[in-house]
Structure formats: structure tokens, C-alpha cells
Amino acid sequence: MTEALIDIKGVKHAYQTQAGPLPVLDGLDLSVPEGGFAAVVGPSGCGKSTLTRLIAGLMTPDAGEVWLHGQQVRGPKSTVGMAFQNPVLLEWRSILKNVMLPLEIVPTRLSRRQQEDRARKLLALVGLEGFEDKRPSELSGGMRQRASLCRALVHQPEVLILDEPFGALDAFTREDLWQTMHRLKAEEPFTAVLITHDLRESIFLADEIVVLSGRPAHTQYVMDVHLKGPRDLEHLYTRESADALNILRHQIQIAQGRAPETEAAE
Amino acid sequence: MTWQKVGVPILAMAIFLALWELLVWANGWPNYKMASPSDLWPAFWKFRELFFVMGWDTLWRTVVGLMLAVVVGVGLGMVMGFSRVMRDALYPLLVGFNAIPKATVVPIVALMFVGQHDFNTILIAFMISFFPIAVSVSIGLSTLEPEYRDILRSLGASQITVFWKIALPKTLPEFFGALKVAVTLAFIGTNLMEIVSPHGRGLGALFDSGKTNSDYPLMFAVLIALAFLGIVLYYIVVALEKTFAGWAERSPT
Ligand SMILES: Nc1ncnc2c1ncn2[C@@H]1O[C@H](COP(=O)(O)OP(=O)(O)OP(=O)(O)O)[C@@H](O)[C@H]1O
Ligand SMILES: [Mg+2]
């Protein structure tokens, strides 16, 4: 019995490689309440994508437990939606048909008409109205990523897993998409886990930021973001945000093994 | 636009035939050295019924052989594309098999299945053409980015569903690229059997009878007929590609 929608306790995982087992996660804890938005940051290659695959049930951990909505995860669940750095849209389908893809897998009570309305509503919400019948190759990188977000949400998942979805975009497009995320969050009842390399992004989007240590990763630091709910870009330039950014930057340096932990108090 | 698509190739062909005629005429070559285009039509007309009967034999056996190559090639490609172990096991075998010149296989096949001409011809057409299909399908499947799999697998979709919805359509452009090579190869395979191990059927046999009777214009006419059939088969594959994998073609803007 837990209150958190996502509850990860003491997860350990190692990959079997030719050079022997490679421990990637070692004692990772993460807990996100229903409707919460957690950002996970950490050094490159520390096991963040591995964590998303564990939450999605694509892999099971060697030790520890992953719980979603009071049920232990033992395999893939249709209550999860995923988006990656690569939008992975299907070139042979229109944008609308791409967004509707999960509805072909997940059992749904919606009629064909309602499914299409749902997809169109999401596309309008992310600013892609009028592009429903275009092919992915006709869209810009930012627009493709928007479509990919719609696809991750179309089946109304409880959990939205985002693995650096804005990582490959230019700074302005990225900020646009941050605001789009807030708009989606206001309309859709998901609980989110966002993997990112961008500390400003984590502060702008999340209510809880988790810093992972270097590989093998454990939960090194958890920060509650002082802002709740939708926010403006100006909030990134306040005193509180600057302080929070500083602390996070310092934690990342520790995770990278570049700063002695004793300095953390300075 | 369409005029250009149809007119330019026809014009190119006319110029080619005119140059050929000119070359033979200017050098005063006799028929046994090089027949000229103006000799071909009478040769064709004299044996027109044979051309249609033999051409049909060549055509249907090539197509059946090719369809067999598609079924087996896609099957092998799937097995190799999805399983590392199978890829490691089968790849050297296939490469070795493909390296054997098929002209040496023809007499062996002809001896193994004496008298079953249709079967033999189809078998050679199949053997010579399944390799590129198997390789392209296996590469297409094994290079599928894991994220493509994950978007469906994370929803609980089975491997089969991932194959039908994503892996298969994503591999179609590679498949058709290989099919264009395979259709030409299958055609060569059919003719190889018909010429090397003649049994009186197919355009290859007609070519062979032209040889025994020293009917040189007939031999050249058969070559032209073969080229014509080859073009037809090739463009049928191109049309299929446009229908099923046209999305892979970027608009030239
Ligand atoms: N399937 C696999 N087999 C073996 N090793 C793997 C596999 N997947 C990942 N790894 C290794 O595990 C480690 C963690 O990988 P993971 O992708 O989870 O890191 P990450 O934190 O997402 O990295 P990045 O920030 O670069 O996206 C890496 O060192 C990687 O090389
Ligand atoms: Mg990653």
C-alpha cells in the first residue's frame, strides 16, 4: 500500500555484456505522487534510459521493486505512454494516423469517430491543427516532437515517460515545447517522469528533481521545486531559480566525480 | 511531363536502333557477324507464334521462380533479422551458396530431376534470385531502432504486432530495391536453364535452335525479345514499389 503513483524502491540492475556484468542501477529510489511531474538528471550513461525501461515494464530489475498505482510492474502495461529524443514517427502514415497508433494496440471503449476526435484534439492542443494529413517528412523537428507527444498521450496513460524528448531541438523550439508541456499538463491527468540533461528544463517543468549519481546510479539528491503548476519563462530568471540551478549544478558535479562531497555545504 | 516520361525513352531507343543499323551498313557486316535491326522484324514475323509461346514459357517460369524467391527470401530474412544466432549461423552458408556460379548448378539440377523441365527452370530462377531479398530483409529488420519497437512493446504489443505494424512496412523500400535486382536475376536464371540444358521450351530454347540452324537474325531477335520481357518485368516491380512503398520517395522540392 503506497500513496505514490510511481514508487521505485531500491532498484538494482546490471546488463550482461561480453566483458561481464555491467552494473547500471544500484539502489535507486523514486516516488512520484499522482499528477506529479518528476525530472531525473544525471551524468551521461548513468542509467537514466534504463530507468525508463524499468518503469515501462520493458525490463524487470535484478533487485528492488517498481510499483505503478499500487501494482508491481512485471511487464509492459498499456497505462504507460513514452516519447524519446528521436520522435520515431512512421513515415508511411499521416500525422493523424501516427498519433492514433496506440489506440490500435490498447483496448479502448472509444468508437472510431471518438478516437479520431481525441487525436485531433491533442494535435490542436500542441499547435498542429491543419497538419493532420501531412506526412512526418513534411514537418519540422519540433513539430514531429509535438506529434510524438500526442501519440504518447492519446490512450490517456496514467504515466508519461519522457526520455530527453527536447534534447535534439534548438533553444527557442525547446522553450516553446516546455510551454506546450504545461498546456498538456493542465488538460491531461498524467503523472510524468522526464529524463533531461537541461537543468533549466527540469526547473521549468518539474515539481520534483532527482539527481542520480554516476554509474552505477543511486538516488543522490532530491529537490522540491518551489513553483507549482504552470509557470512563465520569466520564472527561470528569479533569485530562487538561480539558487536552485546552482545547487543542482553542484550535485551534478558531485555525480560526475568532479567535486568532493564535502564542498556541497559551501 | 508525361510526354517526357514516355517520349524520351522511345526517342532514345529509336536513336539506338538507327545507330546500330548505320554501324552494320557502314561496315558492310554480314548477318552472321552482326544482324541489323531491319533483319530482326522479318525473323520475328516468321516465327511470331513461336515467340509468343516461348515467351510465355519464359515469363511464367520466371515469375513463379521469383515468387518462390520472395517467399523463401522474406522467410529467411525474418529469421536472420530477428535472431542474432540464426544470422551468425545462416549468413556464411548463404554467402557461399550465392558465390557458386549457377551455370555449374544447371547440369546438376538437370540430372537430379531428369525430365521435370518446368520444375528445374523455376528452381534455378529461384536459387539465383532469393539471396538479395533475404539479405535486404534481414538488414532492414535488424537495423530497426529500438525506440520503434519500444513505442509498441511498452503498450503490451506482441512481437508479431510490432512486425506487421512497424518492422515490415519500414523494410519495404529495401525489399523493393532488392526485388528489382532479383527480378533481373530470376530472368537470367530461367534463360540459363533454357539455353544450357535445352528442352525445347522458352526463349532460351528458341535462341538455341537459331544457333543450330545458323539463323543469326533469329538469335538477335530473341535477344531483343528477352530485353523487352526484362524491361516489362522490371517496370512491373517499379509500379508495385510506387504503390506499396511510394512514401519512401522524397518529393524533389
Ligand atoms: N542493452 C544494453 N546492453 C549492455 N549495456 C547497455 C545496454 N543498454 C545500455 N547499456 C549501458 O548501460 C549504461 C547506461 O545506459 P543508459 O542508456 O540507461 O544511460 P543514460 O543515462 O540514458 O545515458 P544518456 O544520458 O547518454 O542517455 C551505459 O553505460 C550503456 O552503455
Ligand atoms: Mg538515455
Image (cartoon, coloured by chain):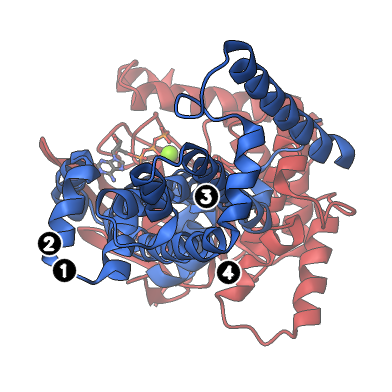
Residue underneath mark 4: A158
Tag on residue B142?
Answer: none
Q: Is residue B115 above or below residue A170?
A: below
Rendered residue at 60%/40% (across/down): B40
Q: Are marks 3 and 2 on the same chain?
A: yes
Please say if the residues under marks 4 and 1 sit with CB atoms less than 8 Å apart. Answer: no
Three-letter amino acid code at the position of disc 3 = Phe
- The reply to whether residue A51 is in sight is no
Q: Work out how far the residue at label 3 is from the one at label 4, CA to CA, in angstroms.
A: 41 Å
User: How busy is the neighbourhood of tag 4: few (under 14 within 10 Å), some, or many (20 plus)?
Assistant: many
Tag on residue B111?
Answer: 2
Q: Earlier in the sequence, mark 3 or mark 1?
A: 1
Q: Are marks 4 and 1 on the same chain?
A: no
Q: Chain of mark 2?
A: B
Relative depth, front residue between B68 and A197: B68
Q: Is residue A239 above or below residue A87?
A: above
Tag on residue B176?
Answer: 3
Relative depth, front residue between B242 and B110: B110
